[in-house]
Image: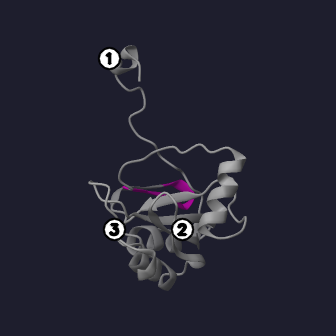
């Protein structure tokens, strides 16, 4: 980072991903209740217009070229499956979260898999037409591994 960018205040304060869900109730139940994203606000308007804003913690925008996207699919799933947009959620326990989300209606594409970048990732088809990854960082603050592939 150069000095000029360090002195400049950030111009983006928040990232919001807006997703149209045909089955609004199912999507809200999945992401709010099963995944555990706290509700920040909800609004209703004319003609049954509804939106809920869920807190997903810290947001990042990950931009990957086609080769990187293919490589991530190969590592997490073993084949090309991801659409242009995939949403990833960092969780405390990938296995437990994956089981909970499958019970809540997600379709598991790939089970929890240890990646070369030391995270435990699973891939799911979720409500609202979203493909998601839930991931758990395995490397501790000191660089040690908190979980092992053999524990899967």
Q: From the image, state whether disc 2 or disc 1 is nearer to you.
A: 1
Q: Give the mark nearest the N terminus, 2 or 1.
A: 1
In this rendering, the answer to whether 142 lies above or below 147 is above
Q: From the image, state whether disc 2 or disc 3 is nearer to you.
A: 3
The magenta span reads: 45-55
Which residue corresponds to mark 1? Answer: 7
Tell me which residue sits at (40%, 19%) in the image. Answer: 5
Crowding at dot 3, Cα within 10 Å, few <14 / some 14-19 / many 20+, comes out as few
Tell me which residue sits at (38%, 65%) in the image. Answer: 91
Q: Tell me if label 2 and label 1 are in contact, CB under 8 Å.
A: no
Q: Taking the image as drawn, is residue 126 in sight? A: no
As for residue 52 lying within the magenta part, the answer is: yes
- Look at the numbered disc 3 and give the secondary structure of its residue: loop
In this rendering, the answer to whether 107 lies above or below 40 is below
Q: Nearer the viewer, residue 69 or 103?
A: 69
Tell me which residue sits at (40%, 74%) in the image. Answer: 148
Q: Tell me if label 2 and label 3 are in contact, CB under 8 Å.
A: no
Total marks shown come to 3
Percent position (x, y) of residue 130?
A: 60, 64
Q: Quadrant of the C terminus?
A: bottom left
Crowding at dot 1, Cα within 10 Å, few <14 / some 14-19 / many 20+, comes out as few
Q: Quadrant of the N terminus?
A: top left
In this rendering, the answer to whether 57 lies above or below 97 is above
Q: Nearer the viewer, residue 36 or 115?
A: 115
Question: Residue 69's mark?
Answer: none
Question: Residue 92's mark?
Answer: 3
For marks 3 and 1, give the CA distance: 34 Å
């Amino acid at each position: 980072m150069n000095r000029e960018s360090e002195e400049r205040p950030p111009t983006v304060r928040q990232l919001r991903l807006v997703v149209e869900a045909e089955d609004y109730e199912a999507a809200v139940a999945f992401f709010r209740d099963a995944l555990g994203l706290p509700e920040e606000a909800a609004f209703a308007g004319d003609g049954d217009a509804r939106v809920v804003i869920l807190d997903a913690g810290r947001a990042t925008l990950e931009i990957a070229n086609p080769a990187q996207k293919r490589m991530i699919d190969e590592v997490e799933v073993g084949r090309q499956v991801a659409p242009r947009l995939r949403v990833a959620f960092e969780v405390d326990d990938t296995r437990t979260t994956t089981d909970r989300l499958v019970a809540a209606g997600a379709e598991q594409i790939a089970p929890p898999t240890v990646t070369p970048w030391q995270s435990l990732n699973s891939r799911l088809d979720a409500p609202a037409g979203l493909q998601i990854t839930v991931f758990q960082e395995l490397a501790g603050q000191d660089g040690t591994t908190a979980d092992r592939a053999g524990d899967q």
